[in-house]
Image (cartoon, rainbow, N blue to C red):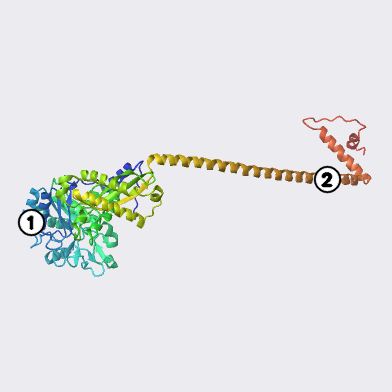
């Protein structure tokens, strides 16, 4: 395992080091930044032409149309499927004249049913092998039957794959969507896949970089065979450094059972895309709901959510309250809508007024306290339903159906909030003063108690000291009397006192002592005693 540590004074400098290590991002063709149509199993010429015509007829912007897996006759021979495409070259030319680019998918495998190409790759040793048998690994693939996995870690594979992928480029396609590059398989829970052996190592070593090796081949072969042309390649499986070869795509987002339930999943992709940008995948994208699954309720796809600006209403007890709500609506009669309003902006202005009128009516029957204490259950739902009915009835004359009105919050107006805030500050100050007074009183009691304890301790200590001093004096007198008990002890005691006197007289630097010859000290020092 090799670890790389990158240091910098800021994020920009750190990412500069990362780019220096992994490579600069490729620049996409300008058209790649436009709107794209991508639908599961879009693999027919007639359907592709119908969709393209529909976009242009309705004036809906669209720059790219994808062809999903299944556009090929076999995985992955890059031949147009017979019966699905009558004249693919002419279709691509016609779409180009309408302003569309076409991107096709490719998988990193060769189906066993594609006998000619499979045998070719097998004989050349271009497949990943089974380490237990030494033969081509038999990969269960989600579609197209069992396949051989192309070993893009083998250098010779690049030109061979490049020649195949060039065929649809020559027909007029503009780029590739490299799908299933993990590689994905039908036996994802089976550890059997770990027996796969690539040219550069076992699959447990290659798995994370396999997609990157494929992306590298696709990009480099495109540029080799199509000079002075920017590559378009979008992938969902790669590794650090993918920005050198491809653009990111986060995989299918949506709900194939119910297209209208996919919006939350799409919302989750927003932080993913932002993180990808910060992590140096500057060009990346995601599906919106609708890649797969049938649309059964077309009107549900047209619902629009309008967040109405907060407005003030007067309660039954003459108190002002701010109400913040949103409304879910859709066009029910397009002709009437455009005759009466003509635009979404005008519709929202009208809905704003209608909703405010309904809110004023319903909120005016309730006291402020009742509104504030209202629970989130049936009580609120009853009000929501009543307001929704009133707003929907008033909006019908504009060709609008109102699906729902919901109140996000009730609040006090700004002036009320300031008054409440001032009252709260006053109450808090009063509480603070009370707590301070209570604290000072408790502190005085504690201090008095402490002073009392100190006096008792000092008094006890002084009494004990006096007792010890008396006992010391008594012992001193006893010892003194004992010292004079015999002549020898009396002489020694006097000698000791003489020495103490001599010691006292020798303080400082004085080295000479003058004594009276008749003094007791002189007599002792001269051996008189």
Disc count in the image? 2
Q: How far from the left and from the top, in percent, is residue 138?
A: 21, 68
Measured in 3D between alpha carbons, the distance from the residue under mark 2 to the one under mark 1, in whole angstroms, is: 125 Å
Nearest to the observer: residue 182 or residue 392:
392
Residue 171 seen in this snapshot = yes
Q: Nearer the viewer, mark 2 or mark 1?
A: 1
Q: Secondary structure at mark 2?
A: helix
Q: Which mark is residue 249?
A: none
Judging by the rendered image, the residue that carries numbered circle 1 is 88
Instruction: Give the crowd class for mark 2: few <14, some 14-19, many >=20 residues within 10 Å.
Output: few
33 displayed left or right of 205: left
Q: Secondary structure at mark 1?
A: helix
Q: How far from the left and from the top, in percent, is residue 513?
A: 84, 30
Image quadrant in which the N terminus is located: bottom left
Q: Is residue 204 above or below residue 453?
A: below
Q: Which mark is residue 472?
A: 2
* N-terminal label among 2 and 1: 1
Image quadrant in which the C terminus is located: top right
């Amino acid at each position: 395992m090799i670890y790389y540590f990158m240091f910098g004074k800021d994020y920009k400098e750190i990412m500069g080091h990362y780019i220096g290590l992994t490579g600069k991002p490729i620049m996409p063709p300008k058209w790649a930044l436009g709107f794209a149509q991508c639908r599961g199993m879009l693999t027919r010429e007639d359907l592709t032409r119908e969709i393209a015509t529909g976009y242009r007829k309705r004036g809906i912007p669209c720059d790219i149309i994808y062809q999903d897996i299944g556009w090929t006759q076999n995985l992955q021979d890059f031949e147009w499927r017979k019966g699905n495409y009558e004249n693919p070259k002419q279709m691509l030319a016609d779409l180009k004249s309408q302003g569309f680019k076409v991107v096709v998918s490719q998988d990193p495998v060769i189906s066993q049913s594609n006998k000619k190409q499979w045998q070719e790759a097998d004989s050349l040793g271009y497949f990943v092998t089974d380490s237990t048998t030494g033969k081509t690994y038999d990969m269960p693939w989600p579609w197209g039957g069992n396949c051989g996995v192309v070993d893009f870690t083998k250098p010779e594979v690049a030109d061979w794959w490049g020649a195949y992928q060039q065929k649809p480029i020559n027909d007029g396609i503009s780029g590739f969507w490299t799908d299933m590059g993990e590689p994905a398989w039908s036996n994802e829970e089976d550890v059997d896949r770990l027996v796969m052996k690539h040219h550069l190592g076992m699959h447990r070593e290659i798995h994370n970089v396999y997609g990157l090796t494929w992306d590298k081949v696709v990009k480099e072969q495109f540029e080799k065979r199509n000079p002075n042309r920017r590559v378009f390649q979008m992938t969902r499986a790669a590794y650090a450094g993918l920005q050198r070869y491809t653009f990111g795509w986060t995989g299918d987002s949506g709900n194939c059972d119910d297209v209208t339930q996919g919006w939350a999943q799409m919302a989750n992709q927003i932080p993913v895309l932002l993180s990808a940008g910060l992590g140096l995948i500057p060009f990346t994208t995601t599906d919106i709901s609708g890649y797969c699954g049938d649309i059964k309720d077309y009107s549900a796809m047209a619902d629009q959510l309008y967040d109405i600006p907060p407005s003030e209403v007067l309660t039954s007890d003459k108190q002002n309250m701010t109400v913040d709500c949103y409304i879910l609506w859709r066009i029910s009669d397009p002709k009437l809508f455009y005759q009466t309003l003509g635009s979404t902006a005008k519709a929202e202005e009208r809905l704003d007024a209608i909703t405010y009128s309904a809110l004023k009516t319903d909120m005016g029957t309730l006291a402020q306290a009742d509104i504030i204490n209202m629970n989130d259950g049936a009580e609120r739902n009853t009000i929501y339903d009543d307001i929704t009915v009133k707003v929907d009835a008033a909006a019908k004359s504009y060709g609008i159906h109102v699906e729902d009105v919901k109140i996000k919050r009730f609040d006090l107006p700004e002036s009320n909030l300031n008054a409440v805030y001032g009252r709260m500050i006053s109450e808090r100050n009063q509480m603070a003063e009370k707590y301070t007074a209570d604290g000072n009183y408790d502190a005085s009691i504690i201090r008095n108690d402490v002073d009392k304890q100190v006096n008792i301790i000092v008094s006890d200590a002084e009494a004990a000291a006096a007792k010890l001093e008396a006992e010391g004096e008594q012992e001193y007198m006893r010892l003194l009397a004992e010292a004079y008990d015999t002549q020898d002890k009396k002489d020694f005691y006097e000698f000791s006192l003489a020495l103490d006197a001599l010691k006292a007289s020798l303080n400082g630097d004085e080295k000479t002592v003058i004594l009276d010859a008749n003094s007791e000290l002189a007599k002792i020092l001269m051996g008189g005693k």
